[in-house]
Amino acid sequence: MSTTLSTVDARGYLAGWLNAVTAMTIADINAIPDEKWTMPFGGCSRPANALLADTVTMLRWTIGALKGEESAAYNEMDALAGEFSDKAKGIASLNETVATFAHALTSASDEALNSTVMTPWQMPTPLFMIATIAVNHIWYHDGQFNYIQCMLGDEKVHWMGD
């Protein structure tokens, strides 16, 4: 069997996916009415602003790990949720954090990306895997934003331009 692919630009592909899921998420965030943005939907559900805070927290923790720094980001999630009561501030913070993440990812050495780090949930994991999880974590929460839209009677697919 021959190999026709000699290299894969894993950082570039992941950074591209990061930008794509961020754009989808922002489209869906913008579709949630402002008066519903901070409203929980019963049971143990969290409001959309808290979901966005969770998204940004994971990205910020991973930025620290990519830079080889300790991060207290997970201790800031509740404060961020309060700050993100203003949807525009939340979106601006997401955009800023995504740009910082992309830079940290593309700047990280192979050695760093292959190293194992201890996550806040106490699971030793290769750093590149954590970076991949952090990017897909955005998409995970976008699914929750979609579900909020559905509960509000909005069946459009906003990230596709509807």
Image: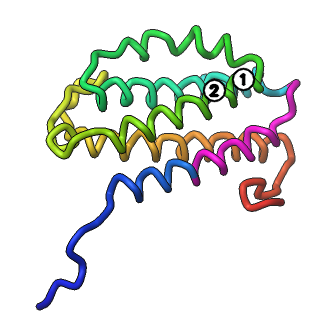
Question: What span is colored magenta in the figure?
Answer: 20-35
Is residue 23 shown left or right of residue 105? right
| Main secondary structure of the magenta stretch | helix
Residue 23 shows which numbered tag?
A: none
The picture quadrant where one finds residue 28 is: top right
Q: Residue shown at 40%/56% (left/top)?
A: 12
Q: Residue shown at 58%/23% (left/top)?
A: 53
Q: Amino acid at mark 2?
A: Ser
Q: Residues within 10 Å of mark 2 (few under 14, many from 20)?
A: few
SS of the residue at dot 2?
Answer: loop
Q: Kindly indicate whether the residue at mark 1 contacts the one at mark 2 (C-beta within 8 angstroms).
A: yes
| In the image, residue 94 above or below residue 72 | below
| In the image, residue 38 above or below residue 158 | above
Q: Nearer the viewer, residue 12 or 127?
A: 12
User: Mark 2 and mark 1: span between their CA atoms?
Assistant: 6 Å
Is residue 104 shown left or right of residue 125? right
Q: Where residue 110 sits: x, y (%)?
A: 19, 46
Is residue 31 shown left or right of residue 51? right
Whether the magenta-drawn stretch holds residue 62 is answered as no
Q: Where residue 98 sits: x, y (%)?
A: 53, 36
Q: Amino acid at mark 1?
A: Pro
| Outermost bottom residue | 1
